[in-house]
Amino acid sequence: GIPTTERLIPKRKPFTSKQISVTFRLKRLFVPTLIVVAAAIMGVILWNFLFRDRGAFSPRTKRSIAVLPFEDLSPLKDQGYFCEGLADELINRLTNVENLRVPARTSAFSFKEKNLDVQEIGKKLNVETILEGSIRKSDKKIRITVQLINVVDGYPIWSEQFDKDLTDIFLIQDEISLAIAEKLKINLLGGLKEKFVKHHTEDVEAYNFYLKGRFYWSKRTEEDVKKGIDNFQQAIEKD
């Protein structure tokens, strides 16, 4: 005559006030704890994404780089035209790359011979990276040193030294350009690579006259413009 429910499921003892209080407190702590844990996980994910490797860039994001005029370390200090010309050539090449923002020559060259920190220059130009370097010419040899610097911390991402004959100047430009593209994670797909390393002349002497022409022409004085025109004409004749 005993009901089935009473036979199978014994009656529970009533909760004490202490048990009820503990259970209620645990339930109240559950939601805040869950929020804190979720926030911590999101923080770790964001930290890894933003700061795990400042030297490595995602190919999907738009990069930015400023190319500063190279420093002339030659004994005779007669390579100013070449220092500006090499930087100008790199600017022209990088400007043609999609998803890469490059400040114009006038903006980048305005910091020439100014005693400013690289990080300060980067902030003024609003770029992530800066390329700077030096040139040392001796007889028929040339040494070019380049550094790609991260503006955030001021540390080099990449640095290399090129020792070549003057006749290899086009090869040096190609090597530097391709190295920059690699470090910035730029994909040179299709015909972009050929365009990126395109040479408008194969005559080194004609190219030197051309660089001198641009160097004098950019000074904008009457005397310098005449020198620029003279060098341009010699470049055309040699080419």
Image: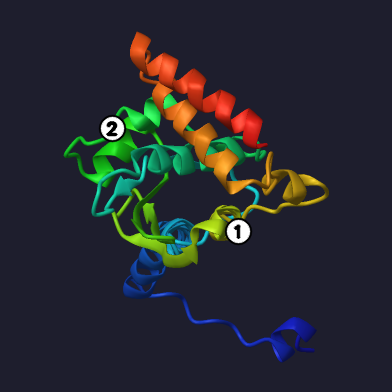
Please identify the residue farthest to the right as the structure is shown.
190
Q: Return the residue nearer the eye: 90 or 153.
A: 90
The C terminus lies in quadrant: top right
Q: Return the residue nearer the eye: 40 or 198.
A: 198
User: Could you say whether the residue bearing mark 2 is in a helix, strand or loop?
Assistant: loop
User: Could you say whether the residue bearing mark 1 is in a helix, strand or loop?
Assistant: helix
- Residue 223 in percent (x, y) is at 35, 13
Q: Residue at x 40, y 57 (%)?
A: 146
In this view of the protein, can residue 33 be seen by the observer? no
Q: Residue at x 39, y 43 (%)?
A: 83
* Res 212 → quadrant: top left
Residue that numbered label 2 is attached to: 111
- Residue 16 in percent (x, y) is at 37, 75
* Res 26 → quadrant: bottom left
* Mark 2 Cα shell of 10 Å, populated few (<14), some (14-19), many (≥20): few
The N terminus lies in quadrant: bottom right
Please identify the residue farthest to the left as the structure is shown.
115
- Residue 54 in percent (x, y) is at 43, 60
Residue type marked 1? Leu
Residue that numbered label 1 is attached to: 171
Q: Could you tell which of marks 2 and 1 lies nearer the N-terminus?
A: 2
Q: Residue at x 58, y 24 (%)?
A: 233
